[in-house]
Image (cartoon, rainbow, N blue to C red):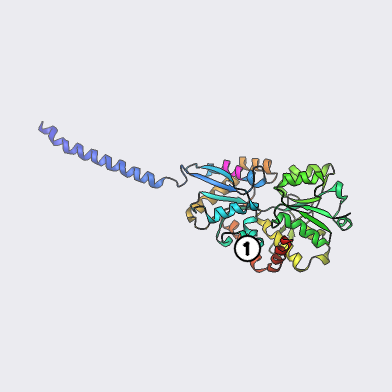
Amino acid sequence: MKRASCQLPVIHAVLGLALVVAHSGQIASAQEQPFYAGKTIRIIAGFAAGGTIDLRARLIARYLPKWLAGNPTIVVQNMTGAGGQIAANYVFGVATPDGLTMLHSPTGPVMNTFLQPESVKYDVRRMSVLWVQEDSWLTAFNAKATKIKRAEDILRAPGKLRIGGSGASSPRSLRPKLALELFGVDHTWVTGYRGSADLLVALERGEIHLFEEPMAGYKPIIQPREKDGTIVVLWQTGILTLEETFKRSEFIPDIPTLDEVLPKEKKAGPAWEGWKALVVPQAFQGMVSLPAGVPPDRIAILTRALEMMTQDPPYREEHQKVLGQPADALFGESADRVVKTAVKRLFEDYQGGVRYLRELAKK
């Protein structure tokens, strides 16, 4: 009995030590738990289901969890209205900056700062850009209704050409209108279409004669109609370089830029400066961004995951299949620098062009 009594304190000590070790292990495990484990990330897409922005957002939502420690759930929320501006105002001005809400958008959140500043509820210079893709846009003409086959035919167009667009301050709407103004061609402007599908139907019905389409829509939408003679593409925006030259997209290299088809004497003054201002954002036509204030470690985690995802063969294959273009992109500091450089140019270099565009939108 005495021997058992002597062992009792030892047993208690061992048990106590075991409990301390177990408790310490739980604390360490909790401390090592990845931030995104068990959490839900929202990708806010400011456009309706089925469009380029929505399709890419859903691709990201499917493939990105694989590259985030903790394998979080990612959902896409379509928050439509005002050409994507409602979504941008929500992400950058309302959502908690905790790294759980991202915006996938085209250029609107940046360009509206200049074209429709009263609609913007944030400082565009403070958002964090994680990922960008460049994209050249092309202008599709109804070849049968207009009888236009080449750029010089525009100057002999019979009657007014009807341009289709979305919102009056949208670059997609402004660019084809500004192009016809630069050519000096009489035209009317029909805005309010919700996207590519509506614009294509309007073109085929003869309600409009031309509209602008992103390069991602070239193969599925434009190219088949080029082959049957319904549509002709006369120019693309190209990508404006830092040297102020217009680079053709390597994915549609046979289509010239407007700079190449516009008569030299037309490329001057505030209207031409406005054209350059409208092409600047093509360097970040697709963008994933976060609001100001997200902790740097979460920005780094998301950036790295997006980079790894974009290099993943299954993602690249499906991106090519769904969107008709490679998944190549810029990430992190490189992506952020592209956008911040464009913003600086718009604030400092193209003020006259921006003013011209604001007046053009009011027409």
Residue 237 placement: quadrant: bottom right
Pinpoint residue 62: horizontal percent, then vertical percent: 57, 40
Q: Is residue 286 visible?
A: no
Query: Vertical placement of 149 versus 1: above or below?
Result: below
Inspect the magenta stretch and tell me whether residue 130 lies in it: no
User: What residue is drawn where x is 73% and y is 57%?
Assistant: 174
The quarter in which the N terminus is drawn is top left
Residue on which disc 1 sits: 343
The quarter in which the C terminus is drawn is bottom right
Q: Residues within 10 Å of mark 1 (few under 14, many from 20)?
A: many
User: What residue is drawn where x is 70% and y is 63%?
Assistant: 358
User: What residue is drawn where x is 67% and y is 45%?
Assistant: 51
Inspect the magenta stretch and tell me whether residue 61 lies in it: yes
Q: Is residue 160 visible?
A: yes
339 horizontally vs 190: left or right: left
> What secondary structure is the stretch in magenta mostly built from?
helix
Pinpoint residue 53: horizontal percent, then vertical percent: 64, 47
Pinpoint residue 139: horizontal percent, then vertical percent: 77, 52
Amino acid type at image mark 1: Val
Element at badge 1? helix
Question: Looking at this view, is 238 or 145 the one in front?
Answer: 145
Question: Looking at this view, is 123 or 80 the one in front?
Answer: 80
294 horizontally vs 219: left or right: left
Pinpoint residue 175: horizontal percent, then vertical percent: 74, 57
Question: Looking at this view, is 142 or 94 the one in front?
Answer: 94
Question: Looking at this view, is 228 or 246 the one in front?
Answer: 228
Query: Vertical placement of 221 versus 296: above or below?
Result: above
User: In the image, which residues are magenta?
Assistant: 57-63
Query: Vertical placement of 310 versus 241: above or below?
Result: above
